[in-house]
Image: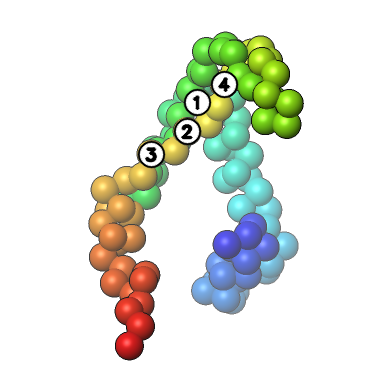
Amino acid sequence: MTKSQLIETVASKLQNVSKKDIEIIVDTIFSCMTDALTRDERIEIRGFGSFVSKVRDAREGRNPKTGEKVHVPRKRTPFFTVGKELKERVIAKKDLYPTSG
């Protein structure tokens, strides 16, 4: 699902709110989440999951094209952990791999 598809879905459920207002709301939510992660804050959405910013230590990597060693610097990266309720709903989806026959 893309951001525009999310806006369309919300707009179809809230017909009394303009798409422009919904777009502002979605942008504000994403902006708040981004700001929180840049401040090293944890974001927890009950029933969905949590986001944290993790630090990855510097390491030696390899250029896949040449095989040459390259230094990969220390960096922060966002990390998502799925919530129990979401995980159970995804697992319960039975038609994920339909059987042929």
Image height check: is 97 above or below 68? below
The residue under label 3 is 81
The residue under label 1 is 53
The residue under label 2 is 79
Q: CA distance from mark 1 to mark 2?
A: 6 Å
Q: Secondary structure at mark 2?
A: strand
Task: Pick the residue in front: 71 or 43.
Answer: 71
Image height check: is 101 above or below 77? below
Q: CA distance from mark 1 to mark 3?
A: 11 Å
What type is the residue that disc 3 sits on?
Answer: Thr
- Residue at left 32%, top 46%? 83
- Residue at left 67%, top 30%? 64
The crowding category of the residue bearing disc 1, from other C-alpha atoms within 10 Å (few below 14, some 14 to 19, many at least 20), is some
In contact (CB < 8 Å): disc 3 and disc 4: no
What type is the residue that disc 1 sits on?
Answer: Ser
Image position, residue 76 (x, y; %): 57, 21
Which picture quadrant has residue 3?
Answer: bottom right
* Residue 10, numbered label: none
In contact (CB < 8 Å): disc 4 and disc 1: yes
